[in-house]
Image: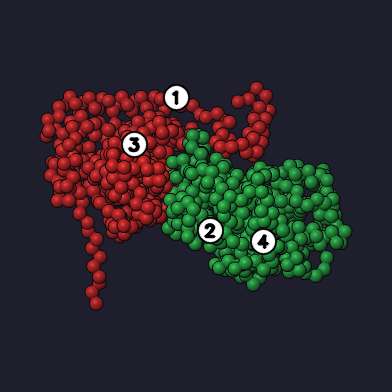
């Protein structure tokens, strides 16, 4: 008896080829109008944000190597997936990141120094989502945020804050996770709840091929985009190194979500060019050939080629490079000026209401520390 | 102390003795009619119906309160605690969720971020563990991460404990895991009056509250003063005064301790019983005041004894009442084994006899 068919090939939505030519794949044709509607300033902004993100990666890694950060989480190679999807969100939308979406936060208005404070051991949280474009806090337990996002989307529904027919006010939720996190129970339960309650929500999986040292083939034998259909929602696989595809498909999915058509899932095929974090050594588990393959599909290089073909000037690219360097230098300077939290913060906000253990232990620690003559904090 | 007195005491101390060991999936037909309308004053209610009344009143008082859980809609939950609520408030406020505990708590966190006050029902004690990660790594820390800008007014109701003759994972006492976790509050009522008021106060709390409901006390009735709370959520209370020794417990164990005190009184020993009510934080005031007078303490719980709430109480009382103690603090617990098949539960669970054995040992010092 012949083996059953195990071919799970799915088409990939790609507008911009790796060579930098706008030539939509058949699946991408319906999305072309969304790209054609973008003005030059927006298209240039995409390039600027991707370039800033990559430059910040260098600054972050350097700070870690110099002992100024406990850890840096690089996103080099994933700029198109992040920048395109972030620009697809409207101001009223809520974004729930994992912990690698630094440029997404910046696009929503977050000062990246707040992220460095997290990595510098100064805070466990770092920012107020309400004041930073509804960009919620990083979540380090993988996929936990998918459930928070789904609950938040349920809340939008219950509040009547979505699906009223007004795209300027109707809100949706965009939640990021990765190929590794896709194996977590929470990620799957979030898809169950989102589908069941028809939440206004887009699940954005950055499939960067590696969960630290484990390849995506260990997480899934079929494209992650197929997970959508299994849970009762559309699933689309996109070229995650194509910023136009990332923008257009996320835009379309979010519009459908806020129009009351329910959740959907996007798998963005991309590649983590650097290490998982600065504690990682990718040379131990992946080949130079593989890295070279993805380097040829670099998201920034192809987009630059396309912008050049549209007439962008050398001066524009020089200006962006200068701005990216300036941003990185400014972030580095201000990160080094960050000072640690006060001792009392250990006990603050563990509870919202008074708690005897907090009061007792805080008082004890103060007394203990102050007992050292001339060495009181 | 000779002979076994458990069964005898049980039938003489409950208002509705036949209901004290209910069929889990099909509650007793003698269960009181649905609590409805606008009751006030002092009512006679079972703990289950007192909690129903508390949930109803909280939902009427604040439209942001909503219920989430498995089978809590038209069925009213496997213990019927939410009976009638979906009919009154609709499926948008009484959510029969998909069957996934982690998602129940995880989505409740998102709803709380949005301003809701979710009350989650975990169907049975042993089924809380799929949600353990969301409770301990997420729920317990959201306020801290958000530097106080976000509160987590979420209540997680957990029917817990033995004495109901059920199968594996249906008779457990997992409260210590949560009392151990900073950022959570953990309480357990022992009687219908406290159950009504404590669920109301738990829902009003801006912090997450694990609300452990002793299953074996769901059906015995007692007076509930719907107009006067009496005590704040985290207060412990002396429920029987005595002079010779103090015993402390929570939830269903309080009934066992009162039974033990009845028997001891006949033999001339005066036991003071403290109902802990709150496991995190623990209100040590009444307990220490009692130990200062009696000089002896026995801590009792259904949960495993090793690294338990009882261990913490014993250590703390030893630290704070050392010069008042005439004997070491003794502990009576479930054994440090998985909960056994139900046919062995009377041997496994602390009984009045087991409590009195410890009382005798403490008094022998």
Instruction: Using the numbered discs, state the Cα–Cα distance from disc 2 to disc 3 in whole angstroms.
Output: 38 Å
Circles 2 and 1 on the same chain: no
Q: Which residue is mark 2?
A: B83
Mark closer to the observer (2, 3): 2
**Residue for point 11% across, 34% down:** A309
Chain A's shade in the image?
red
Q: Dot 1 lies on which element? A: helix
Residue in the foreground of this view, choosing between A319 and B329: B329
Mark 1 surroundings within 10 Å by alpha-carbon count, few (fewer than 14), some (14 through 19), many (20 or more): few
Mark closer to the observer (1, 4): 4
Position of B31 relative to B275 (above/below): below
Residue in the foreground of this view, choosing between A59 and A109: A109
Q: Which chain is green?
A: B
Mark 3 surroundings within 10 Å by alpha-carbon count, few (fewer than 14), some (14 through 19), many (20 or more): some
Instruction: Using the numbered discs, state the Cα–Cα distance from disc 1 to disc 4 in whole angstroms.
Output: 63 Å
Mark number displayed over residue A337: 1
Residue B107 x %, y %: 44, 49
Mark closer to the observer (1, 3): 3
Q: Which residue is mark 3?
A: A92
Count the marks: how many? Answer: 4
Mark number displayed over residue B48: none
Residue A66 x %, y %: 41, 31
Mark closer to the observer (2, 1): 2
Q: Which residue is mark 4?
A: B220
Instruction: Using the numbered discs, state the Cα–Cα distance from disc 4 to disc 2 in whole angstroms.
Output: 17 Å
Question: Label 1: chain?
Answer: A
Determine the residue located farthest toward the bottom in the rendered image. Answer: A1
Q: Dot 4 lies on which element? A: loop
**Residue for point 52% across, 49% down:** B119
Question: Label 3: chain?
Answer: A
- Asked which quadrant contains residue A246, the reply is top left
- Asked which quadrant contains residue A233, the reply is bottom left
């Amino acid at each position: 008896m012949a083996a059953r068919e195990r071919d799970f090939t799915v088409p990939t939505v790609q507008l911009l080829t790796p060579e930098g030519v706008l030539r939509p794949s058949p699946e991408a044709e319906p999305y072309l109008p969304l790209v054609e509607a973008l003005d030059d300033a927006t298209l240039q902004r995409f390039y600027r944000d991707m370039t800033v993100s990559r430059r910040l990666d260098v600054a972050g890694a350097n700070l870690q190597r110099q002992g100024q950060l406990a850890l840096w989480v690089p996103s080099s190679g994933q700029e198109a997936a992040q920048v395109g999807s972030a620009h697809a969100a409207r101001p009223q939308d809520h974004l729930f990141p994992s912990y690698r979406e630094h440029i997404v936060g910046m696009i929503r208005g977050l000062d990246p120094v707040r992220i460095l404070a997290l990595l510098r051991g100064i805070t466990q949280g770092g920012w107020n989502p309400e004041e930073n474009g509804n960009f919620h806090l990083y979540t380090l337990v993988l996929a936990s945020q998918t459930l928070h996002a789904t609950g938040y989307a349920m809340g939008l529904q219950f509040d009547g804050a979505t699906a009223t027919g007004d795209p300027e006010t109707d809100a949706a939720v965009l939640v990021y996770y990765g190929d590794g996190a896709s194996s977590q129970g929470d990620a799957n339960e979030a898809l169950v709840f989102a589908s069941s309650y028809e939440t206004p929500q887009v699940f954005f999986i950055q499939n960067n091929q590696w969960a630290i040292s484990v390849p995506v083939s260990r997480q899934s034998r079929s494209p992650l985009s197929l997970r959508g259909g299994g849970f009762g929602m559309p699933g689309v696989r996109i070229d995650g190194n194509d910023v136009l595809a990332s923008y257009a498909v996320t835009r379309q999915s979010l519009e459908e979500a806020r129009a009351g058509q329910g959740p959907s899932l996007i798998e963005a095929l991309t590649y983590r060019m650097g290490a998982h974090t600065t504690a990682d050594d990718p040379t131990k588990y992946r080949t130079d050939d593989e890295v070279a393959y993805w380097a040829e599909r670099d998201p920034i290089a192809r987009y630059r080629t396309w912008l050049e073909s549209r007439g962008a000037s050398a001066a524009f690219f020089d200006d962006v490079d200068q701005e990216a360097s300036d941003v990185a230098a400014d972030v580095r300077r201000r990160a080094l000026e960050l000072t640690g939290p006060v001792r009392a913060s250990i006990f603050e906000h563990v509870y919202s209401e008074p708690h005897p253990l907090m009061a007792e232990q805080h008082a004890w620690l103060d007394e203990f520390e102050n007992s050292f003559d001339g060495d009181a904090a | 102390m000779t002979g076994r007195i458990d069964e005898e005491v049980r039938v003489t101390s409950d208002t509705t003795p036949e209901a004290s060991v209910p069929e889990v999936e099909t509650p007793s037909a003698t269960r009181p009619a649905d609590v409805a309308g606008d009751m006030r004053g002092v009512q006679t209610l079972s703990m289950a119906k007192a909690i129903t009344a508390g949930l109803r009143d909280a939902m009427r008082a604040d439209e942001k309160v909503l219920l989430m859980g498995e089978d809590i809609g038209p069925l009213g939950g496997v213990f019927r605690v939410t009976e009638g609520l979906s009919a009154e408030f609709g499926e948008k406020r009484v959510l029969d969720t998909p069957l996934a505990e982690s998602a129940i708590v995880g989505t409740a966190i998102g709803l709380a971020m949005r301003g809701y006050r979710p009350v989650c029902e975990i169907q049975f004690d042993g089924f809380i563990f799929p949600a353990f990660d969301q409770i301990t790594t997420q729920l317990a820390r959201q306020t801290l991460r958000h530097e106080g800008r976000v509160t987590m007014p979420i209540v997680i109701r957990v029917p817990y404990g033995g004495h109901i003759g059920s199968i594996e994972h249906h008779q457990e006492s997992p409260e210590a895991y949560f009392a151990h976790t900073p950022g959570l509050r953990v309480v357990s009522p022992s009687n219908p009056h406290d159950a009504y008021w404590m669920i109301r106060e738990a829902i009003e709390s801006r912090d997450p509250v694990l609300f452990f409901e002793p299953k074996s006390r769901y059906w015995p009735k007692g007076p509930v003063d719907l107009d006067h709370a009496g005590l704040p959520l985290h207060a412990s209370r002396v429920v029987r005064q005595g002079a010779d020794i103090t015993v402390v417990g929570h939830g269903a164990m309080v009934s066992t301790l009162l039974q033990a005190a009845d028997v001891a009184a006949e033999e001339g020993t005066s036991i003071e019983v403290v109902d802990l009510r709150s496991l995190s934080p623990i209100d040590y005031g009444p307990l220490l005041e009692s130990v200062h007078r009696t000089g002896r303490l026995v801590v009792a719980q259904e949960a495993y004894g090793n690294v338990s709430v009882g261990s913490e109480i014993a250590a703390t009382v030893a630290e704070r009442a050392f010069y008042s103690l005439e004997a070491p603090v003794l502990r009576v617990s479930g054994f440090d084994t998985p909960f056994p098949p139900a046919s062995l539960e009377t041997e496994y669970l602390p009984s009045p006899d087991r409590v009195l054995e410890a009382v005798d040992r403490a008094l022998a010092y």
